[in-house]
Image (cartoon, rainbow, N blue to C red):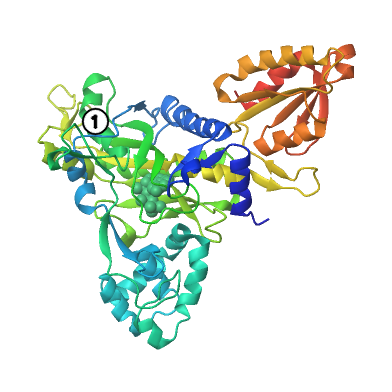
Amino acid sequence: MDKSMDDIMALCKRRGFVYQASEIYGGINGFWDYGPLGAQLKKNLRDAWWNDVVMTGCNGQMGPDGNPVRIVPVDTCIIQNPKVWEASGHVGGFNDPMVDCRACKARFRADHLLVYALRDLLDESHQQTAAWLGVGTIDEVKEQHRKQIDKFTASVGGQLVENTAQFVKLSDEDKASLGCPNCGQKGQLTEPRAFNLMFKTYVGATANEDDIAYLRPETAQGIFINFKNVVDSTRIGVPFGIAQTGKSFRNEVTPRNFTFRSREFEQMEVEFFCHDDDSQAWYEFWRDWRMQWWQSLGLAGENLVLREHEQDELSHYSTATSDIEYRFPFTAPGFGELEGVAHRGCYDLTQHKEHSKAKLEYFDPKRGELAKNGQPKGEHYLPTVIEPSAGLDRGVLAALCEAYTRDESRPSPEIMQFHPRLAPIKAAVFPLVNKDGMPEVAAKLFADIRTRVGSSGFVETDAKQSIGKRYARMDEGGCPFCFTIDGETLTDQTVTVRDRDTGSQERIGIDRVPGYLCEKLGV
Ligand code: ATP
């Protein structure tokens, strides 16, 4: 079944998953708010990550060294000393080349535009395009294009890609002066301009140049700059990871595709520090385990892929990187990145060491030459880093897209088949009718299971409307189980359990409900 993004977005709005930010003022491009169900869904995904990655060290799996994986969390500031971003390269290098159409005011990333220009017609006439865009020779452009087309297609989305198809059909003469992929007008595109993605702000009251600070574009740097603090204040030692979740901000040139490319978003990142000799094994461990983790939350099947980067796609400091990608309705048949797992060498710690002059070397007592007593003398080194960096909002979006199901044979055809762990509503308790003692029994069961379910999700109760309508409402909210109190309950102490995905019903004893629910939810 092809899922329609319009349907999914409409359901998200109607049922309180996602709203346009500042909607009553006309919205603000690239920003989204989560409603009650969305906030809980997002929390559940964040909590699953926190539990499985941080608290249980990759669900209790042994690392490649045969020992438990050790991870500790931090929670660092969104605003840091601006020197952090000079060291990390974000002030100097975090630029996207941007091109505007003077006619329709559409804005493009020049590299996306390049894809449009070269999509089908990779011939010499594009030499000019390549030079104009300042991206190197036509051969380099072709190669770049071949590798990245899927990725770009994912990030530009359906509408522009359709327009692109028209754009590339322009005659040879027209091609000489590039047309705008949006409005088709030629000769209206500006020269590319470098555009830094970091949001600027001022710290303090004077608001002059010296007070400029930046909202973090990633959570990772807050981890690197605290590496030494964590080592010094805990008993943890290499190999170990530091984890953080939190908001990041990027002034994206073209935010689009619902929450996929937003200007404010949340990340879930681990920087895993190990000795360089062991780094390839740790890289493979993280890459494979992260893929399994997303699968365990219901993103199984062919919509999820692990894509290893080719050598010439890698950053200069990285020896291996892979992306975990999901086939969103707006990227299909292509994929969009959910998480990147990168072998970053010791690039980040080296940068911070050089810029801050702080001593960031780690002393590893378990390594080095053996002393006379047969014990290692120890070794000082800058650890190598493996970085699994996931987008929480993109994860939520993938969960929403994966869950969205239409079954026209059901009275209300839209069903959100969330994995039970992620489902924002865990259960509902309904009295079949609002009389004959049923509401009282329902109220007691509701109170009981609400306490058990705790912060993992809502338990709903509702006595109004027909039972069919109440079930349909729960299907749209993705509630996996509904328990209904009816006439039989009053005589034999049983209730019906209705399963969201099949619509089937069975009877169980009312006293078994909490246990049944906990077992099914895995809580
Ligand atoms: P892209 O190529 O899509 O711009 P990226 O490679 O720049 O992403 P990273 O810097 O590796 O992304 O960030 C790690 C993760 O943060 C990504 O895998 C993604 O899930 C998330 N992320 C990055 N940018 C955004 C954004 N603008 N909106 C939502 N999530 C984002």
Question: What residue lies at 26% left-to-right and 42% top-to-bottom?
Answer: 277
Name the residue rendered at 61%, 20% in the picture.
453
> How many numbered marks, from 0 up?
1
Nearer-the-camera pick, 398 or 384: 398
Quadrant showing the N terminus: bottom right
Position of residue 248 relative to residue 124, above or below, is above
Front residue of 259/226: it is: 259
Residue 165 sits above or below residue 408 on the image: below
Residue 140 at what x, y percent from top left?
30, 72
Query: Which residue in the structure is indicated by mark 1?
Result: 227
- Tell me which corner region of the image, top left, top right, bottom left or bottom right, holds residue 515: top right
Q: Label 1's element?
A: helix
440 relative position to 491: left or right: left
Provide residue 41's location: percent of width, then percent of height: 55, 34
> As rendered, which of 409 and 389 lies closer to the eye?
409
Asked if one can make out residue 519 in the rendered structure from this viewpoint, the answer is: yes
Q: Image quadrant of residue 382?
A: top left
Q: Residue at x 23, y 37 (%)?
A: 383
Residue 394 in percent (x, y) is at 48, 45
How many other residues sit within 10 Å of disc 1, few (<14), some (14-19) or many (≥20)?
some
